[in-house]
Amino acid sequence: MRLGSIVPVLLATLVATLVASLLAGCAARVAQPPAATLQVPAQWRAPLPEGAAAALPVDTAWWESFGDPALTALVTAALAHNGDLRVARERVEDFRARVRAAAAGQRPTLSVDASPTRARTLSAVTGKPYDTNVFQAEFQAAYELDVWGRLANTTEAAAATLRGEQANLDAVALSIAANVATGYLNLRGLDAQLELARATLQLRERSRDLARRQFEVGYSSRLEWLQAQAEYDAAAEQIPQLERQVFEQENALALLTGGTPGPIARGKPLAELVPPTVPAGLPSDLLRRRPDIARAEQAAVAANAQLAATRDQLLPTFRLTAGGGIQSSDFSDFLHSPALLWRISAALVAPVFDGGRVQAATDSAAAQRNQALIAYENTVRQAFAETENGLDAITRLREQAVQNDARRATAAETLRIAHNRYANGYAAYLEELDAQRNLYAADVARLQLRSRLLTAAVDLYRAMGGGWSASAGARR
């Protein structure tokens, strides 16, 4: 290639660059983003539960803090086989491929074309047909100069979307782990209630038999016997209801772990499960821990990058192309001494009038950016509210448990006195019956409170991000 042939191309490139610089002010107008309204509180409004450690980090495998191997095995199985989590992983792979596709736009392209041709045509001189052969092979290279950063912004938008999907994978994993832990703790609570119902049924059976014997010997009326029988039937009615709830809870847990409906292995009983220490932390810590906040943040980054790429569509594009090849009418010459062909060009393309399409697309992208910013603030506020509610729930449930202990102690003593009075003939059976009901209600409430306290700890771990972070997500 001679120098004299390249000079015109270089001059054309220089002129095109100068014209592009003059047109740089032609980019679409972008509206300003909305003013930020988010205020991060300095401390929690809710009181910290007793024993909370403000500086304690949230463990990634927080479910192990319950000390139940069966619970740990269930969560581990769910994180490996849950269907929703597998879909989220495939979405990450999908968007990882999209990033590679977007980045490819910043690289040159090269194509090769080899086309042997044989044709028969009529001679313009003699009017007779003759055959011609053309053997040709050529390549073409093209490269777009990213003068305004439009291609880089498109790639950044795809990369931010990928980071958002990775954060979404963490959010799904956190939700699955929390749902499995909550489901297992509720299952152990139902197991405890079923055990209590069966033990209560045995007590009601003894009371019914005693009332029947006293009626048979004329010591009490038939009414007291029927009352004891009705109380026995009411206690028996609770057992199939609780068994149904246990059955359904087992199936729900099996599905969460990616299996088929079936029984669930048990570990520690409800009475031996102790809530882990509350990792209170600071409000600002949520901005680094919660994966849904990271996802909302990356959505805002992606929307802003996409806005920049859309805005620059009104700016001129500068593209370099080069091609070359060999050609001959004889295959032997094509292999040994073909004719060399080449071309090089630079193209400047600038829209002059598009009817306002790019400006409208830019306004739409700006609105999407604003939506992403507002959604980010809403996500952060929701995170603060959920954590506040979790901290307060643990404190109030512990206070309620103290009152329930006092209530149960009173009910147990009342039943003892009522039973002695009835056995010695100083009171009707109705007094003992009411005392039995009160004690059973207190025992059920006690088990339910214990289950709620355990699941409240799970909810707090979920609200505080569960120890997930970018580094934690990369390890899975």
Image: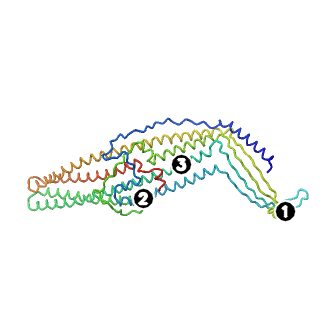
Q: Residue furthest front?
A: 55
Q: Which residue is painted at 39% across and 50% down in the image?
A: 58
Q: Residue at coordinates 78% horizontally, 44% vertically from top-left? A: 8
Whole-angstrom CA distance, mark 1 to mark 3, is 58 Å
**Residue bearing mark 2:** 78
Name the N-terminal-most of marks 2 and 1.
2
Viewer-side residue, 374 vs 295: 295
Q: Nearer the viewer, residue 458 or 284?
A: 284
The residue carrying pointer 2 sits among few (fewer than 14), some (14 to 19) or many (20 or more) residues within 10 Å by Cα, namely many
Graded by Cα atoms within 10 Å as few (under 14), some (14 to 19) or many (20 or more), the crowding at tag 1 reads: few
Where, by quadrant of the figure, is residue 24 drawn?
top right
Task: Tell me if label 3 and label 2 are in contact, CB under 8 Å.
Answer: no
* Drawn side of residue 284 relative to residue 203, left or right: right
* Horizontal arrangement in the rendering, residue 88 relative to residue 46 (left or right): right
Circle number at residue 449: none
Q: Which residue is mark 1?
A: 131
Does residue 176 appear anywhere in the picture? yes
How much space separates mark 3 and mark 2, taking CA atoms? 26 Å
Q: Amino acid under label 3?
A: Thr
Looking at marks 1 and 3 on the same chain, the residue that comes earlier in the sequence is marked by 1
- When asked about the image quadrant of residue 127, the answer is bottom right
Q: Residue 161 got which mark? A: 3
SS for tag 2?
Answer: helix
